[in-house]
Amino acid sequence: MVANIASSSPTSISFKPFEVEAKPAGTNLQGALDVKSEYFIGDFLRLHGEKIGRGDDVRQIITYHADNNDWSIKAECKEQLLNKLLAVVKGGDEQIHNRVFLDVIRDWYHGLDAGSKIENAVVAADHLNAKGQSIARMIVEANHKLGQGSDSIRLLDVGGNDGKLTSYVASHVSDYSGSPVHPYVLEVETGVSWDHNCHEVSTAHNVKNQPVKTIYYDGHDMSSGRVSGEDSSNPLSDGLGFDCAMYQHSLHHFPSPEIQQQSLAQIASLLKEGGVLTISEHSSALGGHELDLMHMVTEVYSDLHRDPEMSGAELESRYNAYVAKEAPANYFSQTRLLDMAQKVGLTPSSSTSISEKAERTYSMTFVKTDVANLNRDRSLEALLDPEALKAVSAKYQTSPVGGLMRSLDGGY
């Protein structure tokens, strides 16, 4: 997502001397890192920062979402930040407090001038539109009869926050299917802001569709659902069900594998027969602490965007509050996602490969139908078959299978 930034010019702040806190070597840096540790950032950099071939990954992790809607930071400036951070951990075995690294990031970010930035050629709305189109393609490729027999298509975005991406997906689903879409976001109210899209971007406009509505519920009981701004409406228990649903990098934020499984079971129960569920996630293959740090620095930059004058102490407090509430997250491999979805009666339809970037994203699409209706091997290898790639961007290249599928570019 693209973050929003205040319009005031960056403040030039001089770098302060580093305070290195000695601490007995009690952490095994070759084992799992403790993301809640007050020394986590330094431990991570010491473990990963010097490894051959990891420089680009670590730079992306540390500068994740540092760019914003108006400009992107030049690559050489991001390299300067990485060098500054690595310089802190060199030359000793002492563990260094997170606040030292947060000060470096804050001072670097505020010290960026106009020459450190390049104007973005693609605005946030274009990004959301392209992403929404890719997700819509995966949904409709999974079931080209989506919504047939009813006067509209119901879409549910689990953890969709501000609903802007939801609106773009709904717009493209409507264009592909020819049916109006009623889009909903499903949320348990938490107050966490990390996944919101740019405040300057409006929701997608499609004359056929209803506006996105947000359903709040207690996280367990479907009957507790309520549509924001409406007194009596509860689409979770009105018996109409949903034609399609999606999790866009939200399932890993559920607090345990058991609750993730419960959520998938709830969504499967809400889908109509032939309904489609698409999930985009981060692979756990390289270790969850890398992905956790990406989310942590996303929150750091979000705070700096909102309040350019934020003090170092306040930034550290915000960082600690986020870590206490949101870390560690529960990431999972494609294989485990397949297993979780099949346990609740969903049949895998297609999958992307894992992206080569540090966030290691992938997407998988499922249909609520008997496996006999999808006439192909359901193994992960078959789902990743590169011979039938149709999606518009490499991140969302999928391999649709037979039965319910067709090409959106024409023909069955």
Image: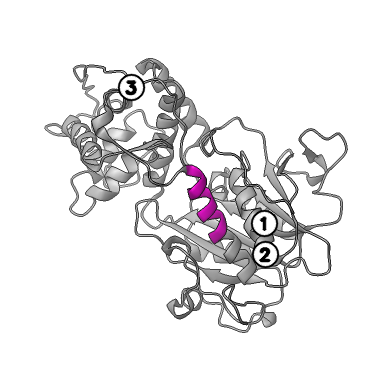
Q: Relative to residue 354, is residue 43 drawn left or right? A: left
- When the figure is inspected, residue 383 is found, relative to residue 153, above or below; the finding is below
Instruction: In the rendered structure, find residue 276 and report the number of the disc placed on it.
Output: 2
* Of labels 3 and 2, the one closer to you: 3
- Quadrant showing the C terminus: bottom right
- Estimate the x, y position of residue 177 in percent, counting from the top left: 69, 66
Amino acid bearing label 3: Pro
| Residue 63 found in image quarter | top left
Circles 1 and 2: CB atoms closer than 8 Å: yes
51 magenta-colored: no
- Magenta segment boundaries in residue numbering: 124-134
For the residue pair 408 and 57, the one nearer the viewer reads as 408
Q: CA distance from mark 1 to mark 2?
A: 6 Å
Residue 27 rendering spot, x and y as whole percentages: 29, 37
The residue at which mark 3 appears reads as 10
Q: Secondary structure at mark 2?
A: strand
Amino acid type, label 2: Val
Which quarter of the picture shows residue 304? top left
Nearer-N-terminus badge (3/2): 3
Q: Which residue is mark 1?
A: 245
Image point (19%, 50%), residue name: 51
